[in-house]
Image (cartoon, rainbow, N blue to C red):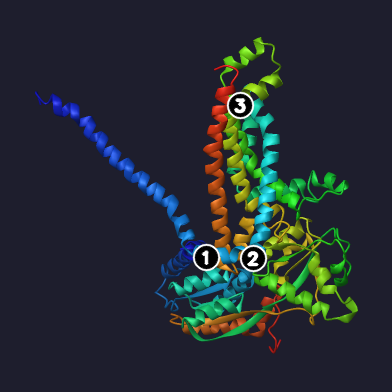
Amino acid sequence: MSGDAPPRARRPRRGGWAARVLAAAAIAIGLGFLALPFVALLSHASPAQLLARLGEPVVLDALRLSLLASGGATVLAVALGLPLAWVLATREFPGKPVVEVLVDLPMVLPPTVAGLALLMAFGRAGLAGRALSAFGVSLPFTTAGVIVAQLFMALPFFVGPARAGIASVDRRLLDAAATLRASESFTFFRVVLPLAAPSLVAGVAMSGARALGEFGATITFAGNLPGTTQTMPLAVYLAMQSDLDVAVVLSVLLLVMAFGLLLGLRSAPAGWFWNRARAQGPAR
Amino acid sequence: MHARGGSGGPAAVAAGVTAGRAALAALFAAVLVLPGPVRAAPKHATLEVFAAASLTEAFTELGKTLQARRPGLTVRINLAGSQQLAAQIEQGARADVFASADRRWMSEVAGRGLLAGGPRTFAVNRLVVVLPAGNPGGIRSLQDLAKPGLKLVVGAPAVPVGQYAREVIANLARDPSRGEDFERRVLGNVVSEEENVKSVLAKVRLGEADAGIVYRTDVTPAVAADVRVLELPDSANVAAPYPIAIVKGSRSPEAARAFVDLVLSPEGRRVLGQFGFSAPRGATP
């Protein structure tokens, strides 16, 4: 074995090549596995055929409702989620792990369970629902109910990235702002938000896409009625039982929207926010 | 693939039951054999009945009846959605009898030449209106289904129970005393079109809907405590037919014939009646 130094030195390098080949194969299989169902969906019908079915009332109603509801749910997720993310990122308090698990819970819960729980809470006969109905507010079977179901499922998808973004802001910048007698709210809006912007935008994209694709909680809590509660995922599911082409049109539409949302909000504007934050950042 | 995966559950359960029975039978045989001379055991046969899930209770009871009458016969009831059962039979699952919850899936199997003889309708399911036990909508009669602001839940048009519900509403509207726009007003009260009948029932049981239209057989004893039932007049109701047939290539055609005869017999009708089914039109009670 003496005098074998060069080969021995080369050995890890060969292993490296083998690992690279294996990794490349795994990546190719993984990406192919993810891409193939979408390719199959897109190749089911020609673009002309898809466009021809695009104008059907069931498609347009579902599209309009999906945009309205997931837009509303995303705005509410930011409004309710940003303070939560801020507190979770910057404060320690007793029972924090319980709060963290509570925030993450909708991500792992089967959506149908979430829908049932929402019914028991905000339904007409539910815990909070009885109080709501005293004010004449009833959520099930309404578009507001769709937004509530989507918000419940989408909120963690905003809080997670937002919290990580806020936590990654350099504490020394906050200390510096404090020494300059900046109020906490001034620091939050002028220092933390611009620096955390890429994460916040990612959170908006994730929660928006989750709201757009929400099915189980929506159909369980809000029901299914075209024009009122039938969002695109619900319309896809029901069209599968009667008109497969309409189901495909809606699926392709959802696919394109989700792809555009994730790609658009993640890359271009995030970079723009980041550069802007760096250019205007109070300390760089 | 999906249908195959789904078949594992009921089939596995049935297999477990059979294994238990076989063990018991072996025990009995041992007890009988040990003290004296070998006794001739009756010839053993197994009958595979593929039945729609809504037939669970009725067919389990009828299977026991046939077993009691024919020593050595084991009746296994494989319960699943009619669509799944049809797929299983088409994929070559061993089945002797097929009982479907609608004609569509029976025709599907028949169309592939997998039936021995034509299917016969052995029962019909009817629709009822169900209300939450507290009757939040204050419904006293079918006429109240047209009350403004009422929350009515039905199946989606593509789902058989949703199609039937719309037929019933149209039938009710033919009565001129209900008012000219009865059908339009009732359909206007539909707040949700559910994807299956159990979801319709759930919305009523939870008190979210004021009324729902479901199959009578869905109002099982467990459900009955949570809901009130509003019967529909026969003139407006629909009859959802349940066909039964012997599968081609049955290994126990004689036992299969005996089971189908039992289901179609007055005793079979009595058992089915206990679980909410009606006799098909033209059948002698």
Q: Is residue A99 above or below residue B177?
A: above
Q: Residues within 10 Å of mark 1 (few under 14, many from 20)?
A: few
Residue under pointer 2? A56
Q: Looking at the image, is mark 1 or mark 3 nearer the viewer?
A: 1
The residue under label 3 is A194
Percent of width and height locating residue B197 = 68, 65
| Left or right position of B91 against B171 | left
Marking on residue A31:
none
- What's the residue type where badge 2 is placed? Glu
Q: Are marks 2 and 1 in contact (CB under 8 Å)?
A: no
Q: Point out the tag, 2 or 1, that comes first from the N-terminus.
A: 1
**Residue A87 appears at what percent x and percent y?**
66, 26
Q: Which residue is mark 1?
A: A48
- Which residue is pictured at 57% across the width and 45% down the height? A261
Of A73 and A181, nearer the camera is: A181
Q: Is residue A187 above or below residue A236?
A: above
Residue A94 seen from this side: no
Q: Residue at x 70, y 45 (%)?
A: A72
Residue ID at (56%, 23%): A279
Which of label 2 and label 1 is nearer to you? 1
Q: Position of residue A32 (x, y in %)?
A: 40, 51
* Amino acid beneath label 1: Ala
What residue is rendered at 62% in x and 37% in y?
Answer: A158
